Image: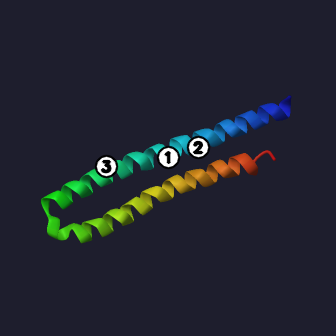
Amino acid sequence: MEQALVDAIRFLGAGLAIGLGAIGPGIGIGILMQGALQAMGRNPDASSNIQTNMILGVAFAEAIAIYALVVALILMFVVGA
């Protein structure tokens, strides 16, 4: 009974870690894309430079979601095992 409770809390924590950890990067990437597309629409000559910076920003934002995934996997498979 006690192990089942530990497992339930562990999986709940893992779900919350990845769920809440993906909200910020998702919102950030949406705002980043909006700004990049508006900038490309206003200045099409600089679109290659804007696109390069946009891809770099998306990579940094996705890194946070990947860290949240790593924390969730650690909670699922290492903690309390």
The residue where tag 2 is placed is 17
Within 10 angstroms of label 2, few (less than 14), some, or many (20 or more) residues? many
Q: Position of residue 46 (x, y in %)?
A: 19, 69
Q: Quadrant of residue 14?
A: top right
Q: Nearer the viewer, residue 42 or 7?
A: 42
| Amino acid carrying mark 3 in the image | Ile
Does residue 58 sit above or below 79 in this rendering?
below
Within 10 angstroms of label 3, few (less than 14), some, or many (20 or more) residues? few
Q: Is residue 56 left or right of residue 1?
A: left
The residue where tag 3 is placed is 31
Q: Is residue 46 left or right of residue 55?
A: left
Q: Position of residue 34 (x, y in %)?
A: 27, 51
Sequence-wise first label, 3 or 1: 1
The residue where tag 1 is placed is 22
Identity of the residue drawn at 78% across and 36% down: 6
| Amino acid carrying mark 2 in the image | Ala
**Element at badge 2?**
helix
Q: Is residue 39 left or right of residue 7?
A: left
Q: Are marks 2 and 1 in contact (CB under 8 Å)?
A: no
Q: CA distance from mark 2 to mark 1?
A: 8 Å
Of marks 3 and 2, the one in the foreground: 3
